Amino acid sequence: MFHAVAANRLLMIACLLAGLCSAPPPVQAAGDSAADFIEPRVDRTAFATFLDQLRMDDDQHLVASMLYSDYAAAIEELAAGIDEEAEEAGRGRVQEALAGSVYIEPQELRRLRAAVLGAYQSGWEEADRLFQELIIDTHILLIDTSADDFERALGRLRRAVYLQPRQAGGLDEAYAGEGVDVAQLVQDASIAGGEFESLDQGLLSADLDEYERQLDALLVATAAADRQGRMNRALARIERDRSALRREEQAALARWQRLYQINRQAAHAIGAVAGRNLGAEARQRWLDRFQRACFPWLFQRAMPDRQQDWITRRISDDAVVEEAQRIHEDYVTQRAGMRREAIDLILRGRQTFRIMLHSRMDSTTLDDSSTRELYQDLLKNSGKRAKLDSDISASLEALLTERQRRQMRSDIAAAAYGRRGS
C-alpha cells in the first residue's frame, strides 16, 4: 500500500535524492493554541527514532530529514490557518471573558467556547493526510530495509504519535494509564540501575512482539474515535450536557478497558519472566513501575519528600538527619498502602461500575448507592493522604530550628518556582 503514491510525489523525492531541489523554510505558526489540538502530530524526536531503526545511507537520511522539514512546515501552516478560524469563531472574546476583562452572558460564552473548539477540529483530516504522506514518502526511500523491519519501526512511531495526546492528561486524577506503552517501560527498566539491567532481552522478545502487534492494531483502530471522544467530552462539559458526557465517558471507558487489558497482561507476563530470571524483587520493582506509569498523578513527589531531601543535604546534625529518615520511611510505607487502596477503588469503579471515578468528579451523576459509596471511600482515601502529608510535614519541621524551617520553606518554594518557570 505504501508504494501507491502519485507520480508527482515520486518525482519530488527523486529530485531531492539528486540534489536538484530543497525543502522550503518552515512556516511560523500564529500561536500555539491550535497546535495543541492538531492530531496526529509527529515530533522531531519520534521521527528521528523512527529513522534510526531503518537501514538508510547518508543521502537517504538527509532526504528523510528534509521530508520531515516539509511535514513540520505544513503542520505549522495548518496551525496558523486554524488559529485564524478560531479567532473568527471568537477565541479572543472567550479569552477576555475567562480572564475577567469583559462580561459575556453564560449562554453566549458557552456558544463561543464550543465554536472555538469546533474550529480546532477542522485540521484533523489534513493532519491525517500529512501523517500518511510522511510515512509513504519515507518508505519510498528505503532499499535495504525489509517489510517486517519497516512495519515494526512504523508501529513504534504510531505508538509514540497516538499515545502522546493521551499521556498529556497524566497528572489529572481522571487518568488511569490511557497513554501507557509497556515496551517503552521495558526500555526504561533496562538502563543502568533499572530492574532489567542484567536481563537477557531475548527472553522478552516473544512477549514484546505480541504486545506491540496488539497495541499497534488497537491504536490504529481507535485513534480517530479517541480524538473525537476527547473533544466531545470537552464540548459536553462546556454545554453542561450530562447525558452526552455520560455517553462519551462510557465509550472512553470501553476503549480504556481494551488498552488496559493489553497493557496489564503484557506487564504481568514480563514480570513473570523477570521473576524467574532475576527474582521476586526485580519482578515487584517492574510491577511498581507499571503502576506508577498508569497513575503518575498519584506518585508525584509530595512536600515530605522535598523536606526530607533538604534535611539530608543541608543539616549537619546526624541525629536530626537519622530521625528525619526514620519519619520519612514510615511515611513512605503508610503512603504506599493508601495509594494501593486508591488504585483499587479507581479500578473497581471503572471495571465493575463503569464510571471514571476521581475525587473531583460531579457526584450528582452517581445514580446508585454502590457507586456513591465507592466515591465516598475514594474521598476518604484522598483526605487520609492529605492528612498524612500534613502530619509528616509538621513532624519533619519540628526537628528544625525556626531559622532552619524558614530557610527550608524558602528553598523548596524557590525550587518549585524554578520548575514552573522552566
Image: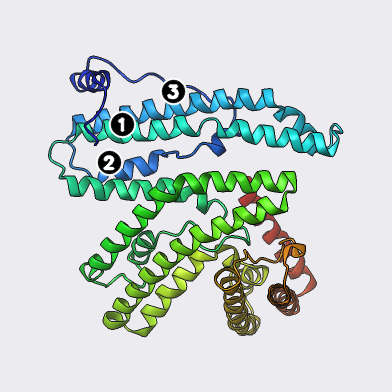
**Residue type indicated by callout 2:** Leu
Q: Secondary structure at mark 1?
A: helix
Mark 2 sits on what residue? 51
Pinpoint residue 24: horizontal percent, then vertical percent. 38, 18
Q: CA distance from mark 1 to mark 2?
A: 9 Å
| Residue 347 image-quadrant placement | bottom right
Residue topped by disc 1? 65
Marks 1 and 2 in Cβ contact (< 8 Å): yes
Q: Residue at x 19, y 29 (%)?
A: 59
Q: Are marks 3 and 2 in contact (CB under 8 Å)?
A: no
**Badge 1 density bin: few <14, some 14–19, many ≥20, Cα 10 Å:** some
Q: Which residue is mark 3?
A: 26
- How many numbered badges does the structure rendering display? 3
The amino acid type of the residue labelled 3 equals Pro
Q: Earlier in the sequence, mark 3 or mark 2?
A: 3
Q: Residue at x 79, y 36 (%)?
A: 109
In 3D space, how far apart are the residues under numbered discs 3 and 2 (Cα atoms)?
A: 21 Å
Looking at the rendered structure, the kind of residue marked 1 is: Ser
Label 1, label 3: how far apart the Cα atoms are: 13 Å
Measured along the vertical axis of the image, is residue 107 above or below residue 356?
above
Image coordinates of residue 138 in percent, x first then y, are: 26, 34
Residue 68 x %, y %? 35, 31
Q: Is residue 252 left or right of residue 306?
A: left
Sequence-wise first label, 1 or 3: 3
> In the drawing, does residue 261 fall left or right of residue 338?
left
- Residue visible at 68% across and 32% down in the picture: 115
Image height of 255 relative to 41, above or below: below
For disc 2, the neighbor class at 10 Å (few under 14, some 14 to 19, many from 20) is many
Q: Dot 3, crowdedness within 10 Å: few (<14), some or many (≥20)?
A: some
- Tag 2 or tag 1, which sits nearer the N-term? 2
